[in-house]
Image (cartoon, rainbow, N blue to C red):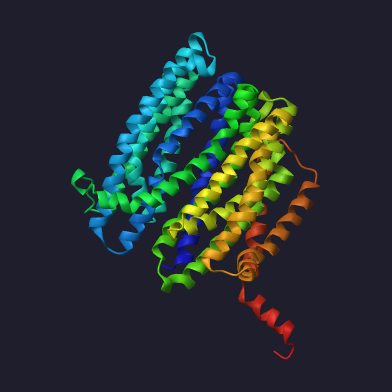
């Protein structure tokens, strides 16, 4: 199967799985808010945002195992693959123990850093311990998920995630209640994590029967080989964590925990839009690693432009849809738990963050290709600069403009750093001209997006029930059909023939 068809297959699979995940996520987010209430739900979001910093403990080895598994699998070098997987697995096990120890410290000091008292303080402490154990278990199995990713078995990776999303949904419906709600949520996530990682282990050994995770395979030479890549990948992870998880913490500390909720709903809807598209970058990293030779350069550039065009088409299409219909989605989704002012605020946050994604997601394709080719130091440092600006601007603007200022604190650095620094660097090092980037990567999306924009304007001016899910679903399906149909037409050979006829009437 060609690289292009592989991208199409995995993008389609990603969107299919994510469509189901989005339905589940939509329902569970609203259901959890209804069961727990705004105050308790705000406490959960605040604690979970702090727990998300455990991702830093991966130290960049998640991307390392993906890159080297894809490289050594392409080279048919089982011994080197065993050495890399063994090294990363033992490192993750040690770091998992550190995560649980850190969670224990947080639990013991919760009254100091969170200001909780009484029964809520006890719940927070138990929740911190469960989340710490959850991280430890997750890290133990992450290396096997990395094996699936390196082998480009994204179908299995996403299938496991989808299956346990269903399990999570069932557990929420059966067990979640207002009393001890945050403890129950943490326990449900723990059960799901154990199941997911067991599946990753089973699939990894099924696909690689000769895979061995043994201490005897852990070698200093392997660590030295992986260290430079993982160090810069770790720097990149730190930056990503600061950008993606700091917002809610800044709001919780500078404003109050209930103020997190309207921001979170705008953020969460933006994440629903971002996540399936971001998977394309995850596909690009191991694929670029397998096309690392100079002989593969033409194929690699075609793959890059194809992936870039798909990302631009999808995220811009979602931005157009959210501009005209995002507020209706939020109003139906969140319901009366939030005030009309909070609904409006959530929509503004959504549009600011999606505007940032218009730039960030295409640039993530550039970053993934650079990482796949082993060019990590400068892209990681650029990302760190963006994270520092994000953190500083978010604090300043939160003080002046509240929750909306935090969203602008994310959008401004993305615009300046990704467009002004990362993109020119990537174009130069990938060896592609600006003309070709525009002509083959960006321009093919123009006509389909114009068609979608016209459709959105026409539909938004019609009289329809703005509080009816069925109407919104039909509008979304028709919008997808307009976008896909226009894209299909622009790629047909008769259009090329028609264009040639216009240039030369004698044809």
Residue that appears at 74% across and 38% down: 466
Tell me if I can see residue 192 in this picture.
Answer: yes
Residue 444 locus on image (x, y percent): 64, 66
**Residue sitting farthest toward the left:** 216
Residue nearest the viewer, comparing 134 with 35: 134
Tell me if I can see residue 30 in this picture.
Answer: no
> For residue 420, what is the image quadrant?
bottom right
Q: How many marks?
A: 0
Q: Is residue 279 left or right of residue 153?
A: right
**Up/down of 179 relative to 291, above or below:** above
Residue nearest the viewer, comparing 379 with 210: 379
Q: Is residue 150 left or right of residue 316?
A: left
> For residue 441, what is the image quadrant?
bottom right
Q: Which part of the image, by quadrant, shows the C terminus? A: bottom right
Residue 48 locus on image (x, y percent): 50, 28
Q: Which part of the image, by quadrant, shows the N terminus? A: bottom left
**Up/down of 477 relative to 120, above or below:** below
Residue 160 locus on image (x, y percent): 39, 44
Residue that appears at 57% across and 45% down: 385
**Up/down of 239 relative to 154, above or below:** above
Q: Is residue 112 left or right of residue 403?
A: left
Residue that appears at 74% across and 51% down: 456
Residue 138 locus on image (x, y percent): 37, 36
**Up/down of 478 relative to 91, above or below:** below
Residue that appears at 48% across and 67% down: 300
């Amino acid at each position: 199967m060609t690289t292009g068809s592989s991208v199409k297959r995995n993008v389609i699979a990603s969107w299919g799985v994510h469509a189901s995940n989005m339905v589940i996520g939509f329902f569970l987010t609203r259901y959890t808010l209804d069961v727990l209430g705004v105050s308790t739900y705000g406490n959960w979001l605040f604690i979970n945002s702090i727990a998300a910093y455990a991702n830093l403990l991966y130290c960049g080895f998640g991307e390392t195992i993906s890159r080297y598994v894809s490289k050594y699998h392409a080279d048919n070098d089982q011994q080197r693959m065993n050495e890399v997987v063994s090294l990363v697995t033992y490192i993750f096990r040690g770091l998992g123990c550190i995560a649980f120890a850190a969670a224990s410290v947080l639990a013991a000091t919760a009254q100091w850093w969170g200001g909780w008292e009484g029964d809520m303080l006890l719940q927070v402490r138990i929740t911190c311990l469960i989340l710490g154990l959850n991280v430890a278990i997750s890290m133990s199995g992450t290396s096997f998920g990395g094996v699936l990713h390196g082998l480009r078995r994204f179908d299995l990776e996403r299938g496991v995630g989808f299956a346990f999303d269903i399990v999570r949904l069932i557990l929420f419906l059966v067990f979640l209640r207002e009393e001890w709600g945050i403890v129950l949520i943490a326990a449900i996530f723990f059960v799901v994590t154990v199941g997911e990682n067991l599946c990753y282990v089973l699939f990894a050994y099924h696909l690689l029967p000769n895979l061995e995770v043994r201490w005897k395979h852990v070698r200093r030479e392997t660590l030295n080989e992986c260290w430079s890549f993982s160090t810069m990948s770790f720097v990149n992870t730190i930056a990503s964590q600061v950008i993606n998880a700091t917002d809610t913490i800044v709001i919780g500390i500078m404003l109050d925990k209930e103020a997190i909720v309207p921001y979170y709903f705008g953020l969460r809807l933006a994440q629903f839009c971002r996540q399936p598209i971001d998977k394309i970058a995850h596909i690009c990293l191991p694929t670029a690693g397998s096309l690392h030779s100079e002989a593969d350069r033409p194929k690699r550039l075609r793959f890059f432009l194809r992936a870039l065009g798909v990302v631009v088409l999808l995220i811009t299409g979602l931005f157009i849809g959210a501009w005209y219909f995002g507020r209706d989605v939020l109003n139906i989704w969140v319901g009366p738990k939030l005030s009309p002012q909070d609904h409006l605020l959530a929509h503004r946050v959504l549009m600011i963050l999606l505007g940032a994604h218009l730039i960030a997601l295409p640039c993530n394709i550039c970053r993934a290709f650079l990482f796949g080719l082993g060019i990590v130091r400068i892209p990681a440092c650029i990302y760190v600069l963006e994270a520092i600006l994000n953190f500083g601007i978010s604090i300043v603007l939160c003080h002046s403009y509240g929750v909306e200022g935090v969203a602008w604190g994310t959008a401004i650095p993305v615009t300046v750093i990704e467009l002004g620094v990362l993109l020119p660097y990537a174009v130069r090092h990938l060896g592609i001209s600006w003309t070709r980037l525009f002509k083959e990567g960006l321009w093919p999306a123009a006509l389909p997006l114009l068609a979608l924009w016209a459709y959105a304007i026409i539909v938004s001016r019609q009289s329809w029930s703005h509080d009816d899910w069925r109407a919104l679903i039909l509008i979304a399906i028709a919008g997808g059909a307009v976008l896909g149909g226009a894209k299909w037409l622009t790629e047909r050979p008769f259009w090329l023939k028609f264009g040639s006829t216009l240039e030369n009437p004698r044809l």
